[in-house]
Amino acid sequence: MIILLFAIRDNITYMKLYYYKSPTGNFGDDLNAWLWEELLPGYFKYENGIIFSGIGTIISADMPTSSKTVIFGSGVGYGYPPMNFGDNRWDVRFVRGPLSAKVLSLPANKYITDSAILVSKIEGFEPLPENERSGIIFVPHHHALHTGQWHEVCKSVGIEFIDPTQDSKYVIQKIRKSKLVLADAMHAAIIADSLRVPWIPLVTSNQINTFKWIDWTLSVKLEYSPSYIGPSSMRECLRNKFLHLYGESFYIKSLNADDSINCFYKQRDILSNKWWPIYSKIIRRCVYTAPNLLLKKIEQFSSPRWDEKYISLAKKKILDAMKRAPMLSSDDVYQSNLNKILNEVECVRKMYK
């Protein structure tokens, strides 16, 4: 995690951001690094003090303690909330969606939508008219890069593969200029919707978190109905098959909000067991890390053709998904959410100036 915290000096309250930073990079999280300075210039310094929690599924017991924490569109999705969440040390401006609000015991008026919608207010990132956009892009979840053959699938279908670990501004501009976004990564859909680019939700593995997706789609008054694509390689298939054994299977087949909440509670209890870190580490090595390394070595030296059937099937499923009507929140819902969040930006500007 990276944290940006608040400190008071010479009557100025400085903020320090708190967000997840993937070792390999992930554009949806990395967006935090520059978005907030654009919106609230001069408010952020690397000091100890009050925490500003921005974009991401980061509300958990792992958050650092502080005399004050500002929650600005963050979501919950992986664990218990921090101790005494919601008391006078917390300034919850809003959370990502209704599921986050429910599990955090917040009133319904404490959710708006994902604060990444604000990217549309940054100069050079405004929505483009349809006649200035072209092409279809596919943005996978960043974990799909570890074992998948999505470059090959996209090449065979004639669409552009976008690596989600690339520079966040580059990825967002690719989304902004496209005609259609095939979104395995949730923030690919969020950014597309924020920039008024139609999108189609995909699922490449059971690691895609249904709870998080429904949390956001309900906030923009859409129904989460993804196309399940599945693996693009043997190694990806093997990985997907055993995700549940080490606590990384988050896809709910029913795509139902109540089922997602119940599953979230069950997984939260399991993952909070004191033995879980040791157990999951051992199991991961046995069922994923070691077999994956072995298969990778075989691929390097013998060029087996075992991925061909997976690539072919993934190609067919993506072509089928592209025949669907794309999704996009209504202009009224979009503008209402944006106006509410812009109002919250002004509240923060005045309260912490």
Image (tube, rainbow, N blue to C red):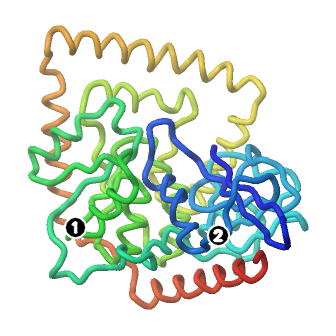
Q: Quadrant of the C terminus?
A: bottom right
Relative to 284, is 62 above or below? below
What SS does tag 1 mark? Answer: loop
Picture coordinates of residue 15, whole percent (x, y): 72, 63
Relative to 235, is 200 above or below? below
Residue 42 has which mark? Answer: 2
Q: Is residue 161 left or right of residue 248?
A: left
Q: Quadrant of the N terminus?
A: top right
Q: Is residue 269 left or right of residue 222?
A: right
What residue is drawn where x is 43% and y is 71%? Answer: 223
Q: Which residue is labeled 1 in the image?
A: 178
Task: Report crowding for label 1: few under 14, some 14 to 19, many 20 or more residues within 10 A (C-alpha).
Answer: many
What residue is drawn where x is 15% and y is 31%? Answer: 309
Q: Of all residues shown, which one is farthest toward the bottom?
A: 332
Picture coordinates of residue 73, whole percent (x, y): 62, 68
Q: Is residue 293 left or right of residue 181?
A: right
The mark that comes first in sequence, 1 or 2, is 2
Which of the 4 image quadrants contains residue 11?
bottom right
| Contact? badges 1 and 2 (CB < 8 Å) | no
Q: Kindly identify the amino acid type of the residue bearing the numbered disc 2.
A: Gly
